[in-house]
Image (tube, rainbow, N blue to C red):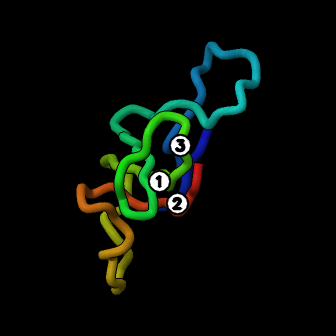
């Protein structure tokens, strides 16, 4: 799985019935949506590298006393900084 403090730890998890290592971070946990965007914030196609962005009720709405304008996409996804 994958997670970060800004997403209250878990963001993705592998399916529990998968018994073999599959080399992935799994699927989004319930109520979480993930997109992959390029440097311009445009969603990339399947198998294209980009920054993982996450949105859900467990994801921070911003950092205290900080300009958060560059931390989110125009449609409200938190930019994780993780490239996949």
Calculate the distance from the C-alpha at mark 2 to the C-alpha at mark 3: 26 Å
Give the secondary structure at mark 3.
loop
x, y percent for residue 68: 33, 76
Mark 2 or mark 3: whose residue is earlier in sequence: 2
Marks 2 and 1, how far apart at CA: 5 Å
> As rendered, which of 65 and 49 lies closer to the eye?
49
Q: Where 73 sits versus 43, above or below?
A: below
Q: Residue at 57% x, 57% y: name it.
A: 82
Residue 38 x, y percent position in the rendering = 44, 56
Label 1 secondary element: loop
Q: Where does residue 33 sit, x and y in percent of width and height? A: 36, 40
Considering depth in this image, is 32 or 24 the residue closer to the camera?
Answer: 24
The quarter of the picture where residue 70 lies is: bottom left
Which circle, 3 or 1, is nearer the viewer? 3
The disc at residue 5 is 2
Asked if the residue under mark 3 is in contact with the one under mark 2, i.e. CB atoms within 8 Å, the reply is: no
**Left or right of residue 7, residue 1 in this image:** right
Above or below, comparing residue 56 to residue 83 in the picture: above
Pointer 1 residue: 8
Q: Residues within 10 Å of mark 3 (few under 14, many from 20)?
A: few
The residue lying furthest to the left in this view is: 75
What residue is at 41 percent from the left and 43 percent from the top? 34
Query: What residue lies at 34% left-to-right and 70% top-to-bottom?
Result: 62
- Answer yes or no: do the residues labelled 2 and 1 have beta carbons within 8 Å? yes
Which residue sits furthest right? Answer: 21
For this rendering, which residue is in front, 26 or 51? 51
The residue under label 3 is 48
Q: Which mark is residue 36?
A: none
């Amino acid at each position: 799985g994958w997670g970060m403090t800004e997403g209250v730890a878990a963001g993705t998890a592998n399916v529990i019935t998968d018994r073999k290592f599959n080399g992935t971070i799994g699927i989004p946990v319930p109520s979480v949506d993930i997109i992959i965007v390029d440097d311009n914030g445009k969603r990339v196609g399947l198998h294209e590298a980009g920054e993982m962005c996450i949105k859900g009720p467990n994801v921070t709405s911003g950092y205290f006393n900080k300009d958060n304008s560059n931390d989110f996409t125009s449609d409200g996804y938190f930019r994780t900084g993780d490239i996949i």
